Image (cartoon, helix red, strand yellow):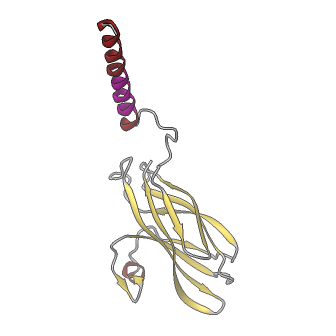
């Protein structure tokens, strides 16, 4: 093998290495993402008999919008939905902020029939401090009544998302 062939192989490795570095930089910088505008870390993991979908956390409003549903076999006659950040103290398994009436993102609905869903908007942060990428990590809780009485409390879902 001549010395020219050896130099040609060496340059192929150098060029390949440079291409790998450039592609890595492009992906890591976020310049090219196949799901631009969708937070890749959004998770809404529901408890049995509950649904959670179409989660959007807006940095410009501080609002969390999502569709929730329940299929507990009981029609809820009045409902309050809450976002409870992780780390909130519990009293008897219920977040203390719900019991105290100071939980963020309280939405009051007239009712939610079993087997139905509803789109809700919860204010969970101030727009002035919510930047793109701000993470909301907590759970969705319901405080509700039925024709049998109440109030009852239910953790509907665990939620993690970032503001877009």
- Answer left or right for 59 relative to 48: left
| Quarter location, residue 96 | bottom left
Residue 75 vertical position relative to residue 59 in the rendered view, above or below: below
Q: Main secondary structure of the magenta part?
A: helix
Residue 16 pos. (x, y %): 37, 23
Residue located 69% across and 83% down the image: 73
Frontmost residue, 59 versus 3: 3
- Answer left or right for 11 relative to 98: left
Point out the residue furthest to the bottom here. 148
Frontmost residue, 32 versus 124: 32
Residue located 54% across and 87% down the image: 152
Residue 97 vertical position relative to residue 85 in the rendered view, above or below: below
- Answer left or right for 164 relative to 4: right
Residue located 40% across and 89% down the image: 92
Residue 13 vertical position relative to residue 138 in the rendered view, above or below: above
Which span of residues is magenta-colored? 16-26
Residue 99 pos. (x, y %): 41, 84
């Amino acid at each position: 093998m001549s010395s020219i062939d050896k130099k040609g192989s060496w340059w192929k490795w150098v060029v390949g290495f440079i291409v790998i570095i450039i592609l890595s930089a492009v992906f890591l910088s976020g310049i090219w993402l196949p799901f631009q505008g969708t937070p890749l870390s959004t998770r809404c993991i529901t408890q049995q008999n509950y649904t959670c979908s179409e989660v959007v956390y807006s940095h410009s409003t501080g609002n969390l919008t999502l569709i929730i549903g329940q299929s507990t076999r009981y029609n809820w006659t009045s409902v309050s939905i809450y976002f409870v950040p992780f780390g909130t103290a519990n009293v008897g398994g219920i977040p203390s902020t719900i019991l105290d009436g100071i939980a963020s993102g309280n939405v009051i609905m007239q009712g939610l029939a079993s087997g139905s869903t509803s789109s809700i908007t919860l204010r969970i942060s101030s727009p002035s401090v919510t930047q793109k990428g701000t993470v909301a990590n907590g759970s969705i809780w319901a405080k509700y009544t039925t024709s049998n009485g109440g109030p009852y409390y239910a953790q509907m879902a665990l939620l993690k998302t970032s503001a877009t």
